[in-house]
Amino acid sequence: MNGIRIAVLNQFAGLTDDEVAAAVTALQIQVHEHFEPAWGIDAEVTFYPDGQAPAGCWQLVILNNSDQAGALGYHDLTNEGLPLGKVFAGTDLAYGNSWTVTASHELLEMLGDPDINLTVFIENSANGGILYAYENCDACEDDRYSYAINGVQVSDFVLPSWFQNFNLPNTQYDYCNHITQAFELLPGGYIGYYNVNAGGGWQQKYAAGQSLKYSMRAYIGSRRERRRTPKVQWIKSNVNKVLTSKNRFARELTAEIGLRPITFTVKFYDGKGGICFFDVSMGNDGKCINSDNGDTQSFTVNQAPGIQIIVVTGSAPNGGKITVEVTDARGNVLTTADDNSFSGNIIKSFIKPYTLN
């Protein structure tokens, strides 16, 4: 170890401490056995279930979303001014992504560029060039390129050769060997860049032919958002101990009464529309989504084990169709519904019953 200590804290009620502890064990293996041999950077990664990080530790905090991060007081740095990584696990579950892959992604990038200020300069003309962010997971970040350690999915990551143009044939560019050349972006990947000549600030470059989605924007407090924020505007964390204690209580209560996080993924076809889901876990107002044609949106709720039946209502100004997929926290599909059509601008139906174990 090189003296870097990283405290992992769980502030998300949708995950139990046992789930986070299992993920942290896999993350420590990844850092020590896979990342350090490639990048020469090692760290001690430890989970603190009481939510209190020892002095001198960098922090990786598991959160619901960026709004919760701000409400709890997790900002740009720890309260000591040390590196801080954030995992928006609730957002991941809402979009059907793996929170452990994101945790791995954030951890490795924090180790590779803890101050979010390193770049690689490509001088593509006599009068200027492009700065590329020194992020080691963005190019291959999509969940499809992840790999498992003890049953926990972790992120693929690029090797130093990805940032070099002088490599020999058969050079390996990422740990899982998906990438075939320097600066290649896999589908679902991206990289931050700064055109020195244009001077338009930090931009995102995506894989060729990739469709842009709202969910691809940088969240407040993310590494991408902090990179484009001047350092003089960075804020140390001032964690609200009362709120974090309430959050831990909610997480413990959720585990005690046996609730499980369930994700509803909805895709709209043939026109704009809105759809609402109703059951006891969603409150009186249910969960409602407005969407454009071809858009996919998700949300996560906690439900009790047993047989579940969800009421669905919706409307679309020009008619349309939706599909719904219900998955558990591990990505297992519990049920699907693909025959809900907007007939007469209104749908009223039940999602097929499913059993939550």
Image: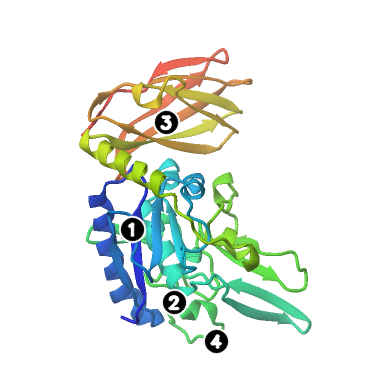
Residue at the (44%, 36%) spot, across then down: 299
The amino acid pointed to by label 4 is: Phe
**Taking the image as drawn, is residue 305 in sight?**
yes
Q: Which residue is mark 3?
A: 324
Instruction: Say which quadrant the N terminus sits in.
Output: bottom left
For residue 38, which numbered disc appears in the image?
none
- Badge 2 amino acid: Leu
Residue 159: image tag: 2
| Residue indicated by mark 4 | 166
Tell me the distance, in whole angstroms, between the alpha carbons under discs 2 and 4.
14 Å
Q: Of tags 1 and 4, which is closer to the observer?
A: 1
Report how far apart the C-alphas of labels 1 and 4 lie in the structure.
46 Å
The answer for how far apart the CA atoms under marks 3 and 1 are is: 39 Å
Mark 3 against mark 1, which lies toward the viewer?
1
Quadrant of the drawing holding the C terminus? top left
- Is 313 or 112 nearer to us in this picture? 112
Q: Is residue 171 left or right of residue 214?
A: left
Q: Residue at x 34, y 62 (%)?
A: 53
Q: Is residue 207 visible?
A: no
Relative vertical location of residue 228 with respect to residue 323 in this rendering, above or below = below
Sequence order check, earlier mark of 3 and 4: 4
Q: Amino acid at mark 3?
A: Val
* Residue highlighted by disc 1: 52
Q: Is residue 271 left or right of residue 16?
A: right
| Disc 2/disc 3 C-alpha distance (Å) | 38 Å
